[in-house]
Image (tube, rainbow, N blue to C red):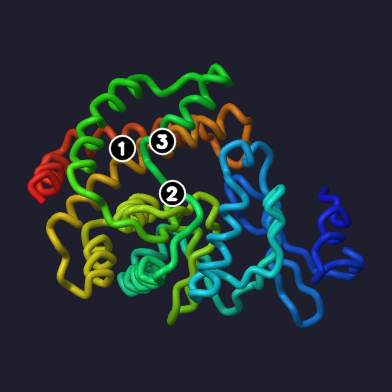
Amino acid sequence: MENWQLYFSRIPQLSGVIPETLKIERLGGLTNRNYKITLENSRYVLRIPGEGTNEYVDRKAEETCARITAEVGVNAEVLFFDPTDGVQLTRFIDNSMTMNTKLFIDSSACERAAIAFRKVHTCGKLFATRFELFSMIDEYRNLLEQKKAQLPEGYIQVLQEADLVREVLNLRELPLAACHCDPLAENFLDTGERMYIIDWEYSGNNDPMWDLGDLVIEAEMDLEQEQALIEAYFDGNVPTVEHGRIVIYKAMCDLLWTLWGVIQHVNDNPADDFWSYAVMRFDRCKKLMESNSFSQAIAAVRQG
């Protein structure tokens, strides 16, 4: 049971409100506790960060990202954010549906997601921090070493094989833009006309192709859905090199989020079986890295 006054007392919109007079509904979330709060004619979402998340989430940077994307019109309006612990109050987006892998079967939903991504990527504003794949892998590994955690069998070997990816991506300066970087299907809210993206915890300046590749994986898109997403983003003309980086990032996001899953496992997060989650992501990463499409993507990016 939440100590509501602990949170309400510091949020202007809820200060002095008696919790028993509100309608409070628990929403989804893998690591955080999210609640829809109805106060008369106003509806909000209160996000209470999960235990241990501040070990690897920069809340001050997240606030910057959340406010910029709200101004751009892609994120929910941010009404309150406490950077000391990440407690956040946003305006509830009416008439929207939380997306999942099944809902992304609709190619028009993929297209709306692409438009939302492009709006953020081309907004002309940068975030406070950079999302750097291999630095994050190192950071997560160091955290897991401190916790004396076990990694999926073969992880270090595959990470060494990923040095080729690092080499190829470093051949030329990559574009940097404001990116979400953690596009779970459930982080998208669809009105049928417009797609919103929420939960900017892991966002940072990154190669925009990461967002596309990661969403393909998170939404478990087939080739038709993937094509709808990418073609909508590029207005039908998909550059070969950019497509190559998308394929590379499909594997690399699994390599990274494998470690995130292990962190949730050792932190005893009860939301899921995170060891199985980590192993699944690692196996999928290995499979793609062993494929012809991955080799072709490496060659395309190398050639430029």
**Horizontal side of residue 176 vs 268, given as left or right:** left
**Horizontal side of residue 50 vs 182, given as left or right:** right
Q: Which residue is mark 3?
A: 135
Question: Viewer-nearest of labels 2 and 1?
Answer: 2
Q: Which mark is residue 130?
A: 2
Q: Residue at x 60, y 75 (%)?
A: 93
The answer to which of marks 2 and 1 sits earlier in the sequence is 2
Q: Amino acid at mark 2?
A: Arg
Residue 21 x/y as whole percent: 89, 70
Rounded to the nearest angstrom, the CA distance separating label 2 from label 1 is 26 Å
Q: Is residue 164 above or below residue 33?
A: above
Which structural element holds mark 2? loop
The answer to which of marks 3 and 2 sits earlier in the sequence is 2
Label 2, residues with CA under 10 Å away: few <14, some 14-19, many ≥20: some
Q: Amino acid at mark 3?
A: Ser
Q: Residue at x 34, y 21 (%)?
A: 156
The answer to which of marks 3 and 1 sits earlier in the sequence is 3
Q: Which residue is mark 1?
A: 284
Between residue 172 and residue 5, name the one nearer to us: 172
